[in-house]
Image: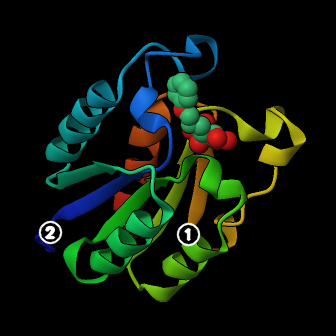
Amino acid sequence: MAQSKTILVLNGPNLNLLGQREPVVYGSGTLSDVEKLCSDYASDAGYEIDFRQSNSEGELVTWLHEAENGAVGVAFNAGAYTHTSIALHDAVKAISTPVVELHISNVHAREEFRHKSIMASACIGQICGFGTSSYTLALQALIGHIK
Ligand code: CA2
């Protein structure tokens, strides 16, 4: 990761399946489509994107640690780990790089177990419910915060 103008966009478990199942909830765009959306948005704003996905909690923790020196900000869709992972909360707290939590769906309008975010209190803010536009809205918020 090269730091100066790099924003890390992190994706957690099952998001590799985007566009393949549950289109009513998550839309029909794939994760590659989301990567292109993010790259185009960021490059217009003078930034570059390091776009990653992992199904492994430990790998996400390691990538957050690397963001301390490798990125100016992180847009993070932690998937279901949002609701369960103290390790990811601690990793966000452990770095000084600002992190925005994001979700494609409106987690607050879904099952009760999705209403609680363990991540949110460690992040600078949360964006949810705007489909894949949540990614570009998170980038907008992050870039505004960094400037
Ligand atoms: O709305 C979001 O972005 C979520 O982070 C997505 C997670 C879910 O556990 C969170 O509560 C909200 C699930 C990601 C699974 O993505 C899939 C995509 C297509 C088909 C199946 C799963």
Q: Is residue 9 above or below residue 36?
A: below
**Res. 106 image quadrant:** top right
Q: Amino acid at mark 2?
A: Met
Q: Position of residue 131 (x, y in %)?
A: 53, 27
User: Is 43 or 114 nearer to us in this picture?
Assistant: 114
Residue 2 location, x and y as percent? 10, 70
Categorize mark 2 by other alpha carbons within 10 Å: few (<14), some (14-19), many (20+). some
Please name the residue that numbered disc 2 is placed on.
Answer: 1
Give the residue type at disc 1.
Ile
Q: Tell whether 45 sits left or right of 53.
A: left
Mark 2 Cβ inside 8 Å of ligand 1: no
Q: Which mark is residue 124?
A: 1
35 to 93, vertically: above or below: above
Asked whether residue 9 appears in the rendered view, the answer is yes
The residue sitting at 47% across, 50% down in the picture is 12
Residue at image point 41% right, 85% down: 96
